[in-house]
């Protein structure tokens, strides 16, 4: 369960009193740990650190310099200490390594025992983000925290942070995550980062450096279904966290406007209602926005005396609870919302009944890539596949700060790639206990090549979007993380500092910039390395013209004597060959290199087509996603 592994979390701090951070049953702090706990407002190391929270630091100087004014802790509800006022850091820390806590639910929903990915791992907290302007983290503070975390002796770092587009270059000091993580990875520390919440639009993925393990968000096989029964006896299922008493049949309205746009009054974020129209009634509204629209509409309807809200929005499984669990705000997709609207417009006296939410687990709820999860291709380096992997990131129940307006008895459900990254940090901690000598690249490779692309029933994984579609590598990298498969991957695509320098040279960064990043004099070879040859567990060819050949090297981490054969799934309109197509490993041969030649029949510029190359020995299936886009140059 991750015992002995130290997970560092860069975030908004921690609420140490949460039961998720009890050190009951844990042994002594690992002797190699060099870190410490730092005191501050409402945080005393002797009281608030233990054998679970073994480090807690806070970094604010860079933020204050960038913010250009003193941090008003009372106005922003903040603590100059590792204490978490926001709740985000507590949530991510407990998701990565929270201990077992029984009988936890969110307003009665999702009841069970809560635990983190590696419940016996230790936590080192680095507060680099502050509860100002919606949460802000200075690059200087992030870099300083990386320095301290490397010195302290963490094994894994979890960062649910990212700088918005346009992306900085890998050598730009304004991207403290790219630069700091390079140094951490060269010291053997795996850095796990969230992919961002810019989906489902393409090219929105953040934290794209090849040394970072980048995580997209998936839904889980759980839903909180809430019946909506209309006066015509039709029942629709929405999603909500409505734990109050059933709202018996009440009048149902949709605000109509006069003038050029009759629907303008029914837009959730600018709902136009008055008490005489809404009092005692349920309101339907439509939005293309998310959290702020749901919250503002709920407040408007409640203030006007309404008893419930139905929000029609983009089809997706993530939903946003109202702050008041007794007031139902039930979310449905546009199709159901439109059918409810037609009922309102056709019925003389439209009425509706809203029932309490129920927790549904398993069939027929299957995992999908979340609507909001940022997608590839990588805007900075299209040949480097990002995201790498997906993990649960929708309606994740974990600990939070009691100052969190949505919390219920210290726990809350949040959605975002912020929630998926600590899942993978926890998985890496588990893998680290089995394979203590693996490099960060080996952990990434093991996860990518063994990931789930199908539901256990064989049903393929979809990606939420407009419309829903089959998920591809730009949605979820290798697939949804499969911890048990990653524990025994058979082969890994390993990388070290020299490979990352080859990438920097292939990106055409100048020697001065690369030397500044690496901290040592670095000169790129005369012949620029091909970015297609970077030893990733995936292959992405963004501009294939006729034919191209690239190489990969695999390291055997399974049985010392084994034979692997290549199984090729070529992308549409391409032919793919692998030489050699049989790899023979023995006690002397641990690493083998092979070449891949991809030829296209397309005579037009295309979008991406997807396939795979899988090495199998009959026990292991080591699958690399293959993404190809043809580009036919025309002379002008």
Image (cartoon, grey):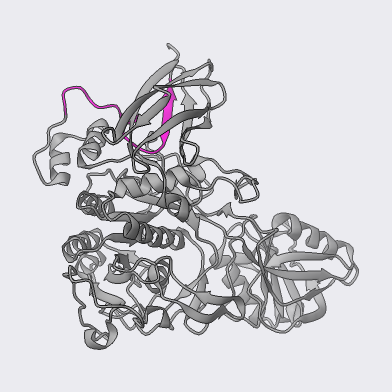
Q: Which residue is drawn at 41% across and 52% down?
A: 487
Whole-percent x, y for residue 461 in the image: 60, 47
* Residue 219 horizontal side relative to residue 274, left or right: left
Viewer-proximal residue among 130 and 580: 580
* Residue 117 horizontal side relative to residue 263, left or right: left
Image quarter where the N terminus lies is bottom left
- Please determine whether, in this image, residue 55 is positioned above or below residue 317: below
- Please determine whether, in this image, residue 44 is positioned above or below residue 204: below
Quick check: can you spot residue 550?
A: yes
Which residues lie in the magenta part? Answer: 525-544
Quick check: can you spot residue 71?
A: no
* Residue 101 horizontal side relative to residue 93, left or right: right
Whole-percent x, y for residue 463 in the image: 58, 48
Image quarter where the C terminus lies is top left
Q: Which residue is drawn at 70% across and 56% down?
A: 334
Queried whether the magenta region covers residue 537, the answer comes back as yes
Whole-percent x, y for residue 302 in the image: 65, 80
Q: Residue at x 30, y 64 (%)?
A: 137
Queried whether the magenta region covers residue 565, the answer comes back as no
Q: In which quarter of the image is residue 263?
A: bottom right
Viewer-proximal residue among 42 and 428: 428
Viewer-proximal residue among 295 and 539: 539
């Amino acid at each position: 369960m991750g015992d002995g592994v130290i997970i560092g979390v860069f975030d908004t701090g921690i609420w140490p009193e949460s039961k998720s951070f009890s050190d009951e049953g844990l042994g002594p702090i690992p002797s190699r740990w060099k870190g410490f706990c730092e005191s501050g407002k409402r945080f005393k190391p002797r009281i608030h650190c233990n054998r679970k929270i073994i480090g807690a630091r806070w970094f604010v100087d860079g933020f204050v310099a960038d913010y250009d004014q003193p941090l008003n802790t009372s106005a922003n509800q903040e603590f100059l200490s590792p204490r978490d006022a926001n709740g985000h850091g507590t949530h991510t820390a407990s998701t990565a390594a929270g201990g077992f806590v029984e009988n936890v639910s969110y307003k009665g929903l999702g009841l069970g025992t809560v635990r983190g990915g590696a419940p016996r791992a230790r936590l080192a907290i680095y507060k680099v983000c502050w509860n100002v302007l919606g949460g802000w983290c200075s690059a200087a503070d992030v870099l300083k925290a990386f320095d301290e975390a490397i010195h302290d002796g963490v094994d894994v770092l979890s960062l649910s942070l990212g700088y918005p587009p346009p992306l900085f270059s890998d050598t730009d000091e304004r991207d403290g995550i790219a630069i700091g993580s390079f140094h951490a990875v060269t010291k053997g520390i795996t850095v796990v980062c969230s992919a961002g919440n810019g989906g489902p639009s393409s090219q929105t993925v953040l934290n794209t450096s090849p040394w970072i393990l980048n995580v997209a968000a998936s839904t889980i096989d759980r839903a909180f279904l809430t019946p909506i029964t209309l006066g015509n006896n039709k029942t629709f299922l929405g999603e909500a966290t409505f734990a109050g008493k059933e709202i018996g049949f009440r009048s149902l309205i949709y605000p109509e406007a006069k003038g050029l746009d009759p629907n303008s009054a029914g837009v959730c974020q600018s709902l136009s209602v008055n008490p005489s129209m809404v009092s005692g009634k349920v309101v339907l509204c439509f939005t293309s926005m998310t959290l702020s629209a749901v919250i503002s509409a709920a407040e408007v309807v409640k203030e006007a005396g309404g008893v419930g809200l139905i929000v029609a929005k983009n089809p997706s499984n993530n939903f946003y609870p109202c702050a008041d669990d007794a007031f139902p705000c039930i979310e449905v997709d546009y199709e159901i919302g439109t059918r409810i609207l037609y009922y309102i417009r056709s019925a003389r006296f439209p009425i509706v009944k809203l029932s309490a939410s129920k927790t549904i687990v398993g069939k027929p709820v299957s995992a999908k890539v979340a609507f909001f999860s940022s997608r590839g291709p990588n805007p900075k380096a299209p040949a480097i596949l990002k995201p790498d992997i997906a993990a649960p990131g929708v309606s994740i129940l974990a600990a939070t700060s009691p100052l969190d307006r949505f919390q219920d008895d210290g726990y809350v459900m949040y959605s975002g790639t912020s929630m998926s990254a600590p899942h993978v940090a926890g998985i890496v901690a588990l893998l680290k206990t089995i394979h203590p000598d693996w490099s960060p690249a080996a952990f990434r490779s093991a996860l990518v090549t063994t990931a789930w692309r199908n539901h256990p029933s064989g049903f393929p994984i979809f990606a939420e979007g407009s419309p829903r579609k089959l998920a591809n590598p730009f949605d979820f990298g290798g697939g949804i993380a499969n911890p048990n498969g990653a524990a025994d991957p058979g082969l890994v695509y390993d990388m070290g500092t020299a490979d990352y320098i080859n990438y920097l040279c292939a990106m055409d960064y100048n020697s001065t910039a690369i030397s500044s990043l690496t901290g040592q004099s670095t000169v790129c070879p005369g012949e620029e390395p091909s970015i297609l040859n970077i030893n990733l567990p995936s292959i992405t060819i963004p501009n294939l013209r006729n034919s191209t050949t690239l190489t990969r090297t695999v390291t055997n981490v399974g049985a010392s004597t084994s034979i692997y054969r290549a199984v090729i799934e070529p992308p549409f309109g391409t032919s793919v060959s692998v030489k050699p197509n049989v790899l023979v490993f023995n006690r002397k041969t641990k690493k083998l290199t092979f070449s891949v030649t991809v030829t296209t029949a397309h005579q037009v510029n295309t979008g991406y087509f997807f396939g795979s190359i899988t090495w199998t020995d009959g026990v292991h299936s080591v699958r690399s996603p293959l993404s190809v886009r043809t580009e036919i140059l025309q002379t002008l």
